[in-house]
Amino acid sequence: MTTTLKTKTARLSVISNSLLIAMKLGVGIITGSVSIISEAIHSSIDLVAAIIAFFAVKISGKPSDDRHPFGHGKMENVSGVIEALLIFAASAWIIYEAVGRFIHPGETEALGLGVVVMAISAVVNTIVSRRLYKVARLTDSVALEADALHLKTDVITSAGVALGLALIWITGWHVLDPVIALAVAVIIIYESWMLLRKAFSPLIDTALSGAELEKLTGILTEMGISYHDLRTRAAGHQRFVEFHLDVPPHETIETIHLLCDMIEQRLESEFREINVVIHPEPKKSD
């Protein structure tokens, strides 16, 4: 059910981005606005990201197998890294085009049409990004969160381009067009850097976040569990936890097994998808 929900949501992003690209590119060519064309390029990268996210959530939802005994959760992180690198490439192209417009100035036409298209884009992406964020939080999906972040940035840049075109319309200062394009590129670079940091971290088995670790240790403390050598890591929406459990030296195997089951059940009820490995050890006397 979770994988189906994520897949449907990712498909929505693919469809909306495809329609917006066609609209922005057409109006960008008609008006000759490099800022609108830069937005079309931005949306093209969003489309690629949405397609990557679509396949990533499908693959990450597959159960573990012989080749992937720990599941496929990291596929979402891999997709996030790829998306971030694609955004870097897009921002470089936008900067190149904007600098070229500074060197060879040109005038934009049909500015009213450009403002309308950018406003429509901002509204559509606001609706879709909110949906993506909602499902990302519900399913703990890195891929959908990355896609939502793309669209959130697209909302900001589309609104900025619309405002800039309106100012050009009012003032006649066509130099604002490449200035806006450069501003879009800076925002995109910042977005890609934040995404890259978030997506790459789990690929090198970084521990769970401070908030999750605090929640985890709080539960163990609440249960009166004595433990040591706690290790954690994340893989997409999956969480992996292992630790050594201190038990009385002469306790029966059956009692220890029941205690381990109780701990696992409690953690599984508190975390969405968690894999717990417990190694019982005789408690050392004080």
Image: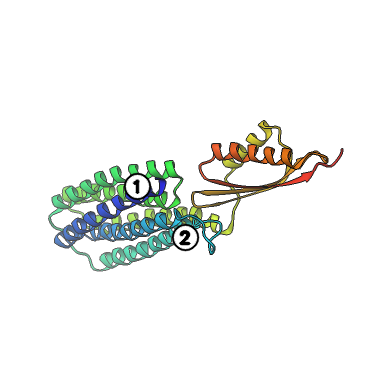
Q: Nearest the camera: 166 or 224?
A: 224
In this rendered view, identify the residue nearer to me: 127 or 39. Answer: 127
Q: For the residues carrying marks 1 and 2, which lies nearer the camera in this image? A: 2
The residue pinned by badge 2 equals 78
The quarter of the rendered structure image containing the N terminus is top left
Could you tell me which quadrant the C terminus lies in?
top right
Mark 1 closeness class: few <14, some 14–19, many ≥20 residues within 10 Å: many
Q: Quadrant of residue 80?
A: bottom left
C-alpha separation, residue under disc 1 versus residue under disc 2? 21 Å
Q: Amino acid at mark 2?
A: Val
The colour mode here is: rainbow
> In front: 103, or 27?
27
Instruction: Kindly identify the residue that appears in the image at 77 percent across and 46 percent down.
Output: 281
Compared to residue 103, the image places residue 202 above or below, namely: above
Relative to 114, 53 lies left or right = right
Q: Residues within 10 Å of mark 2 (few under 14, many from 20)?
A: many
Q: Is residue 171 visible?
A: no
Q: Position of residue 49 (x, y in %)?
A: 36, 58
Residue 33 in sight in this render:
yes
Residue with the mark numbered 1: 152
Circles 1, 2 touching at the beta carbon (< 8 Å): no
Q: Amino acid at mark 1?
A: Lys
Q: Report x, y in % for residue 127.
A: 28, 42
Q: Earlier in the sequence, mark 1 or mark 2?
A: 2
Rendered location of residue 39, percent (x, y): 27, 57
